[in-house]
């Protein structure tokens, strides 16, 4: 396997862990704690890095079905991160996350997980 793909795979697994900690914490507490901010931000940085490495290491065009699913899920998590940060800046850590943002975070995370799983399945099917 190409070295870019190896490192991209390792880094996207770290992004999965970071996103999971952030989203599960927010879903349970309904608050934007430092833990949520830190892990969500780390997840975005890791995800962007992994995506870049995987694009560089792949011999395919970046516009495959999995690529589009991956880009859209990354965009969803990026939007979630911006909204979570905005809530934290304007409302602080003690104010409960609005229901719409709470639900959006859940669906963006689920969409990202689906993209993660399809990537793993594509590797297994090769």
Image: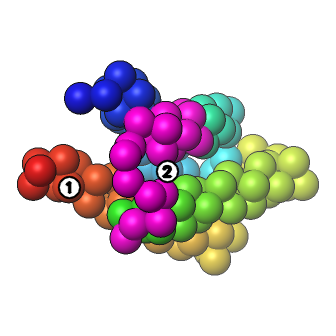
Of the pair 93 and 69, the residue shown nearer to us: 69
Which residues lie in the magenta part?
A: 46-65
Within 10 Å of the Cα at label 2, are there few (<14), some (14-19), or many (20+) other Cα atoms? Answer: many
Q: Is residue 38 above or below residue 125?
A: above
| Alpha-carbon span between mark 1 and mark 2 | 26 Å
Percent of width and height locating residue 29: 53, 51
Quadrant location, the N terminus: top left
The answer to which of 16 and 105 lies nearer the viewer is 16
Question: The residue tagged with tag 2: helix, strand or loop?
Answer: helix
16 left or right of 95?
A: left
**Residue name at image x 61 percent, y 61 percent:** 75
The quadrant in which residue 118 appears is bottom left
- Pointer 1 residue: 122
Residue at image mark 2: 23
Residue 106 visible in rendering = no
> Dot 1: within a 10 Å radius of its alpha carbon, few (fewer than 14), some, or many (20 or more) residues?
few
- Does the magenta segment cover residue 59? yes
Where 36 sits versus 117, above or below? above
- x, y (%) of residue 43? 54, 38
**What is the basis of the colouring in this image?**
rainbow
Q: Which residue is most to the right?
A: 90
**Residue at the location (41% across, 36% down)?**
57
């Amino acid at each position: 396997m190409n070295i870019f793909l190896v490192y991209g795979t390792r880094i996207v697994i770290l992004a999965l862990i970071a996103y999971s900690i952030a989203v599960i914490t927010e879903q349970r507490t309904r608050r934007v704690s430092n833990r949520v901010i830190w892990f969500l931000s780390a997840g975005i940085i890791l995800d962007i890095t992994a995506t870049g490495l995987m694009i560089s290491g792949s011999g395919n065009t970046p516009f495959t079905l999995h690529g589009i699913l991956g880009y859209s899920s990354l965009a969803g998590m990026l939007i979630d991160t911006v909204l979570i940060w905005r809530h934290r800046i304007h409302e602080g850590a003690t104010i409960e996350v609005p229901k719409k943002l709470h639900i959006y975070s859940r669906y963006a995370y689920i969409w990202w997980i689906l993209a993660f799983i399809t990537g793993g399945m594509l590797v297994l099917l090769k």
